[in-house]
Amino acid sequence: MQKKWWKESVVYQIYPRSFKDTNEDGVGDLKGIIENLDYVKFLGANVIWLCPIYKSPNDDNGYDISDYRDIMNEFGSMDDFNELLKEAHKRDLKILMDLVVNHTSDEHRWFVESRKSKNNEYRDYYIWKDSKNGKEPNNWGGSFAGSAWEYDKNTDMYYLHCFSKKQPDLNWENPKVRKEVEDIVMFWLDKGIDGFRMDVINMISKDQTFPDGVKAEGSLYGDKDSVIMNGPRVHEYISELNAKVLSKYDIMTVGETPLVTPKIAMKYVGEDRKELNMVFEFEHMDIDRDESSFIKKPFDLVKLKNIFTKWQKGLENGGWNSLYWNNHDQPRVVSRFGDDGSYWDKSAKMLGTCLHMQQGTPYIYQGEEIGMTNVSFEDIKDYRDIGAINHYKEEVEIKGKNKDDFMNYLHELSRDNARTPMQWSGSENAGFTKPGVEPWIKINPRYKEINVENQINDPNSIFNYYRKLIKIRKENEIVVYGRYDLILEDDKEIYAYTRTLDDKKLLVICNFTKNEPMFCMPEDIKYASFKTVIGNYNMDDGEIKNIKLKPYECKVYILQ
Ligand code: GLC
Ligand code: CA
């Protein structure tokens, strides 16, 4: 297996809006990140992924970019960014930028021009279509409710927007668009950044026949995603970007790719493919929800084990996994797959262990390292996510779905669960912004109990447990490169697996329940001695052939 720095890295994801506010306007900013680089360094991560910081009218919190070469006013200036990059590099921290090029903002200069007339030189930068029988060009629904097409009176045509109507999709069929993207990518790489996370990058190539999508029961629109993802020319486009720009720099790239299987993923990340280093898959995130009907499904551990194992095995030859539980689009994992009540501390540590001991590059989302939890806003008015707000309108106000059911869905799965401000301390506003200032989104009421200040000096905290997980990875090749194998496949309570490198095995045992199941070592695992690596309870085992696990207990051993 080829060794690479990005395989040995741990990424810390920052959502700048909610990280740290330094000028008392209730919005996090670049200075707030600079102030806390030492915090990230202390945690032990060595790469920072910044969610979009470019100029944006913030319809979708920066995922709607109006100028790719400038910084969002609320976040600061290009000087601030230059300082951030310099200060990060001084500490050996790398910076990954978010590249959002499936769409722009409707306030981007290109779109402002494009909508002016049918023969404007920017017209073909976007996807314009005539109406069909007096209606939208096809039945696609947008990811944030409503149709994916917006009628524009000016030229009597529709434009495609897979997300909000303020996020028109770029037309990658147009070579000029591809050239623009190359130039933007080069602009940032020449500044010295260390790579990109590429937003919904497998959506960029649309089937030019624009076929209808399948309409699920109860749905107003057809499903565009299964038509659009991994489109006909996507590999051509990414290879081109790689050949012309990416390959000229020593960087890391990770593509956000909904609806991929390991087989499809290998086309993006296979070492021989020269496209991307990693992708974010969604299979393990879709395990407990049905996004088309807004229903939370029960969690099923055996299913989760199967998914992870499929990915671990599917990419082990010539590919590489990204490992994540959390990001700015997902609810908090301790509330989702753990227990944020009595077993908050134990389950947060267990989940961290289960993920960090796998093969791949781990991504930690801000606040995960202190076990931040979901939030239940009672009123839809407290939600900020355009997805939550638009879907509420469509489901509750238009389709008449039960309001409490929908609010419960948001409590469990809304993206805003991840977006409440970082909890630095127990003082008013959680140290995110000055007391008295109103933050852009409400603080999670549990900040008094769950915050950095409480945990940073406590050797038994979740924070220090994460530090240890990272340290173990950095000090043990087996954690990075060892082969993964699932054991106790059918066990409904325990997720256990081994990692193998040369004559060593790492054994990882995780109890996903509040029960006390028995772990029984499979016969075929042979070893002469064992050594304790990490665990979330005291590890005083005399023998490890049969272990009665405590609630949410995890244990990691080296066997030799
Ligand atoms: C990605 C981002 C998400 C955003 C969407 C549209 O899924 O992670 O936050 O809303 O793309 O850009
Ligand atoms: Ca601010």
Image (cartoon, rainbow, N blue to C red):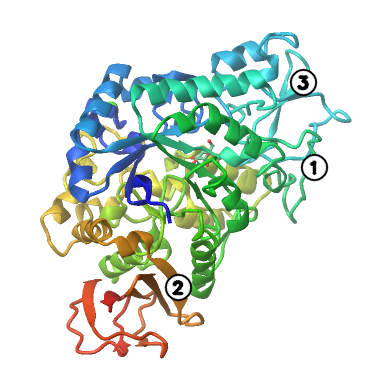
Q: Residue at x 56, y 53 (%)?
A: 403
Where on the picture, by quarter, is residue 546? Answer: bottom left
Residue beneath label 1, please?
212
Nearer the camera: disc 2 or disc 1: 2
Mark 2 CB within 8 Å of ligand 1: no
Sequence-wise, the earlier of marks 3 and 1 is 3
Query: Which quadrant, please, contains the C terminus?
Result: bottom left
Residue beneath label 3, please?
157
Locate residue 405 relative to residue 11 in the image: left or right: right
Rendered view: 515 above or below 447: below
Sequence-wise, the earlier of marks 3 and 2 is 3
Question: How far is mark 2 from mark 1, CA to CA?
Answer: 41 Å
Nearer the camera: disc 3 or disc 2: 2
Q: Residues within 10 Å of mark 1 (few under 14, many from 20)?
A: some
Query: Which quadrant, please, contains the N terminus?
Result: bottom left
Position of residue 74 measured from the top left corner of the image (x, y, whole percent): 34, 23
